[in-house]
Image: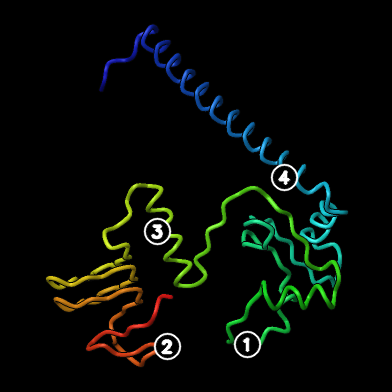
Amino acid sequence: MPDPLSRDELDAKLGRTMAQVETIEARIAVTLANLQGELGKMQESIKHLPSTRAFLATTLGGTVAGVLAIVGVLAFGGDRFDGGVQVAEAAAFDTVPPDTPYESVAALYPALNATRPGSVRVCPVQAESHDIGTPLDYFRTSMAFAEREGTRPAGDSILWDGVEIGEGAVVDRCIVTDGARIPARSTWTGQIIRRLDGALASGEHAAGNLAVSSLW
């Protein structure tokens, strides 16, 4: 068995532990102060929206029945609706056709607001918004983060796992998905490329053992 610690050693260990606790407490205090500052900014930004805070509390608390509510905490580009966090009741999507791609911002929300005025509320905030809802959005967001981190790839292409690029092939501004093999001395620009291991999807064409569609 190890020798028991002396009183001095115990006091030293306790001192180090207390110092670590104080450091953690200081970090927590800084984090809380930052959060309070951000909340304060958000409160200031929504003061001009009538009854917005009450609307948020009532809607998210679920205390009002039969209200088709969509609440957005959104980032804006200029003066247009640009994306962000969206909170909606399930009933808001009752009119959306099943198994069908549907545009929420351009179609659903305007229709809801027309039939139920006030059912769509927006809270603009000064924050970045990065979308990955379409392949092109995913590509642009990936390149933006890579640029910021200094890891932008050669050819500005996104290569998933197991991709093989043949000798002399050029792949420029493409998304190449898992396991695709790019033939040697071939050139690809602005394409989504995947292995052709089944039926072609809408908008795709076959190129050897690859399924290819336009990224743009």
Considering only order in the chain, which callout, 2 or 4, is on the residue closer to the N terminus?
4
Report the residue at 57% width, 52% height from top: 128
Report the residue at 68% width, 50% height from top: 125
Considering only order in the chain, which callout, 1 or 4, is on the residue closer to the N terminus?
4
Quarter of the picture containing the C terminus is bottom left
Q: CA distance from mark 1 to mark 3?
A: 33 Å
- Residue 143 in the image: state x and y as whole percent: 40, 58
The residue singled out by tag 2 in the image is 203
> What residue type is disc 2 on?
Gly
Q: CA distance from mark 4 to mark 3?
A: 29 Å
Front-most of residues 119 and 65: 119
- Quadrant in the picture for residue 211: bottom left
Considering only order in the chain, which callout, 2 or 3, is on the residue closer to the N terminus?
3
> What residue type is disc 3 on?
Met
- Quadrant in the picture for residue 108: bottom right
Question: In the image, which disc is placed on residue 42?
Answer: 4
4 vs 2, front mark: 2
- For this orientation, the residue located farthest to the top is 8
Instruction: Mark 4 and mark 3 in contact? Answer it, CB < 8 Å.
Output: no
Question: In the image, which disc is placed on residue 143?
Answer: 3
The residue singled out by tag 1 in the image is 98
Element type where label 1 sits in the image? loop
Element type where label 4 sits in the image? helix
